Amino acid sequence: MTRIFLVVSLLGLTALPSAAANLAKTYSYFSVGGTTLEELERQLNERGPHVKSTGRRHPGATRMQFNTRLGYTEKSGSCRITEATVTVKAKVILPRWRQRGKADQDVRLIWDTLSDDIKRHEEQHVVIAQNHARELERKLVGLGRQKSCAIAAQKATATADKVLDKHDKAQAKFDTIEGASYEKRMLKLMRQRIRMIEAGKIAG
């Protein structure tokens, strides 16, 4: 069974990778030009990935597909799922600035902060998907013995629908929280980056 989900970037949040479920992750980039914040904003709005659910373009997005493979064992007139492997295929779409070297330092500072925040946000979407894929694997194997493999397959489908609906809601909640804290988070991240530049830990 396959389930496709699309999440978009509302910017921000660091997350540790989750061990579990198979993950096939790829990256693609769209180029933006300009040397001022106004030009960069316009380029992001014009070139960012278009999302049908919102009807507009975004500074980043992650397209995800859930693929589930099941192993069944029949014994003594019953059937159970003995193996469940859920693979998350994630394509992360991020911006790449072509004219960074020509821009003023304050513009580079804001862009670098924003760009890092977009990437962290999209990586967190992948982590959320992995966590639900791991939950799905556990619940599928835990369905127990059924009267037939056909019944086991039906219960597997119903279980997958419930877990993936829960996944969709978790992704939407994450975006809502991120959107509400965007300005506060960006100011904090920029202060941190300025301190790191002053300490010589990163280039300005």
Image (cartoon, rainbow, N blue to C red):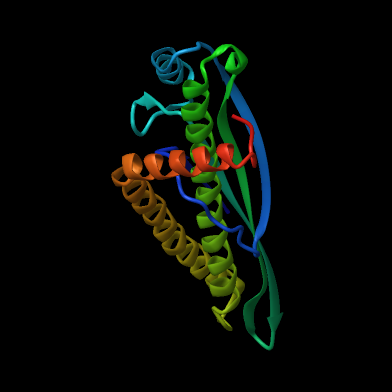
Q: How many marks?
A: 0
| Residue drawn 38% across the image and 45% down it | 185
Q: Who is closer to the viewer here, 103 or 158? A: 103
Q: Position of residue 101 (x, y in %)?
A: 62, 16
Q: On the picture, is 37 further left or further right than 145?
A: left
Q: On the picture, is 203 further left or further right than 115?
A: right
Q: Who is closer to the viewer here, 62 or 106? A: 106
Q: Position of residue 72 (x, y in %)?
A: 68, 72
Which quadrant holds the C terminus? top right
Q: Who is closer to the viewer here, 193 or 56? A: 193
Which quadrant holds the N terminus? bottom right
Q: Position of residue 131 (x, y in %)?
A: 54, 62
Residue 8 visible, this orientation = no
Residue 150 visible, this orientation = yes
| Residue drawn 52% across the image and 42% down it | 195
Q: On the picture, is 37 further left or further right than 78?
A: left
Q: Is residue 18 above or below residue 173?
A: below
Q: Position of residue 61 (x, y in %)?
A: 49, 35
